[in-house]
Amino acid sequence: MKILKNADIKNKSVLLRVDFNVTLRHENVVEDYRMRAALPTVKYLLEGGAEKIILISHLGRPDGKYNSKFSLKPVSDHLAKMAKEEVEFLPGDIRKECGDIKKKIQKSDKRVLFLDNLRFYDEEEKNDKEFSKILSGFGEVFVEDAFGVCHRNHASVVGVSKILPSYAGLLLQKEIEILSRLLNNPDHPLTFIIGGAKISTKLPIIERFLQIADNICIGGALANTILKAEGTSVGKSLVEESMVEVIKRLKLTDRRLHLPVDVVCAKDKDAEDTVHVSAVGKSRKDESIFDIGPDTVSLFSEIIRKSKVVVWNGPLGYVENKVFARGTDKVARSMANATSKGIFTIIGGGDTYLILEELNLMDKISFVSTGGGAMLDFLAKGTLPGIEALS
């Protein structure tokens, strides 16, 4: 893989793909971890003498058409404050106004410029060749630093790198180096904690980690699906029905796989007066599981304490309601405590690091990956389309 430190960037226009898919509220950035993580690459390019840095990113899911709600203008403004560098935002349709935008870039006295949301165009997610050519026309060198989308076959991820001299940015290089440690002779005991809703998206990583991990702790709605496949009653809980038969055939009975032993139930997510703790399999038919119980928290925390490396992706309960976020919060604190004792801890996924951010624990984790799905895919496969494109 070609890396940025080996690139000739002096006096050149650099097209920089970042993942600034951050949380906005009232047109203000309220969570900027991905931006902070990519800032060293921006500063490296500035200090290395790049003439212009043209940033490209996506934000949300605007369904292939312009929607002011998903404009990157607030993100561009936030970047200017973070980098202490003037940033020129360049709105407009990059397909129809390509020539005009290029002229603005050439005439601009700013070194950092920002195009609007790539997902305003269907062609981005279709990896359209003509769209890749349009994007490539904005720079002389391409730097891929958006690890969070490197599992996508999109124009800005794999299309542009076929046209321009292309390199991995500092963030992408760091992500690959740290996550590769888990695949190449990791320290043991190695523990993987996985939560979230859909087991279909996470089954490949569970199967992969059953080959290399000492413990896999499972919570969230995906645990419900496994429990149901095992014949355990889960009441009205969220279950991925299409996966029940698949899991039955896989016979996920490995002793290293740790499912909840108790759960927090309620009649629905807002019926707080019906909340109670129940042993697994003992919840009533008119109830749903919304969180792991205190005994499960203790079990997972003890496993974390005895590990040397712990990787966590996905909330362990319905964290949108604070009543059902307690299990996740306590496991997060166990992760932070483990880090202070010298255990190497890794978290990934937007939901997971938002939880850490709220608890002021981000700096108490050894490494926070900017990828969720990308992190899981990389750990399952050892590579990603966006990384392969840089070979």
Image: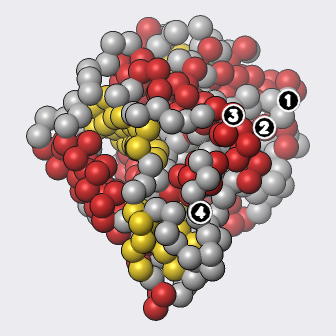
Q: Nearer the viewer, residue 245 or 80?
A: 245
Going from N to C along the chain, the mark reached first, 4 or 1, is 1
Q: Amino acid at mark 3?
A: Arg
SS class, disc 1: loop
In the drawing, what numbered circle is on residue 233? 4
In the drawing, what numbered circle is on residue 124? 2
Q: Residue at x 78, y 38 (%)?
A: 125
> Position of 239 compared to 77: left or right?
right
Q: Residue at x 45, y 82 (%)?
A: 275
Going from N to C along the chain, the mark reached first, 3 or 2, is 2
> Position of 46 compared to 334: left or right?
right
Residue tagged 1: 128
On the question of residue 28 being in view, the answer is: no
**Dots 2 and 1: beta carbons under 8 Å?**
yes
SS class, disc 3: helix
Residue tagged 3: 249
